[in-house]
Amino acid sequence: MIWKVTSSLFIIIILIITGTGCLEINQWSGKGDLLIDLSIENVTVTMDRNITNRFILTFTNPNDHALGILRINYWISIFDENGSGIKNDLPIPSTLGPTNRDIIVIEPGKNISFFGHNVWDWFIKSGKIYYAIAKYNPSADAMVTKPYWRGELTSEKLYFSVE
């Protein structure tokens, strides 16, 4: 009889704690606004392949709450000034889907940046102007059970020249 009373009180206490928000499973949301910005280490690229010139992709959380994003669901494409896509020499992405370990939490008003691929991963030529676009489009994935931002973002065109 004492065991039944004790277990009933324990359940009631857990329900009270959970109902007041004292016990929170996830301390971030998957809802709200998300901003994306693409930049490059040097806007003028020289043909010296020994100089690294990476893209920088920045996500900003303008919300008043923390926001989770998947860090592996973005890609960068390069186009010539006529809008034709440029081939790259990048490895084929893994077929493994994202997991909860791939969620990165961005605090309110903060941003997080990723260094992307080097410009030399694409077949670019000197004397040309190119532009790059970054896209972020995470899909619902059964392997990810925690909240993360879903939608589609496309950066502004980032122009750069190759000398």
Image: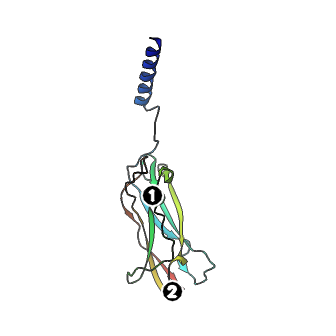
Pick the front one: 127 or 116: 116
**Mark 1 belongs to which amino acid?**
Gly
Q: Name the residue carrying label 2.
A: 125
Q: Residue at x 42, y 25 (%)?
A: 16
Q: How many marks?
A: 2
Q: Position of residue 48 (x, y in %)?
A: 61, 83
Quadrant position of the C terminus in the picture: bottom right
What is the x, y in percent for residue 76? 45, 70
Residue hosting label 1: 97
Q: How is the image coloured?
A: rainbow
Q: Residue furthest right?
A: 50
**Residue 32 x %, y %:** 38, 50
Callout in the foreground (2, 1): 1
Q: Residues under labels 2 and 1: Cα distance?
A: 34 Å
Residue type at mark 2? Lys
Q: Residues within 10 Å of mark 2 (few under 14, many from 20)?
A: some
Q: Residue at x 47, y 12 (%)?
A: 2
Compared to residue 143, the image places residue 21 above or below, namely above
Percent from the top left, x then y, of residue 102? 49, 54
Q: Which element type, helix, strand or loop, lies under badge 1?
A: loop
In the displayed orientation, state which residue is furthest to the bottom.
127
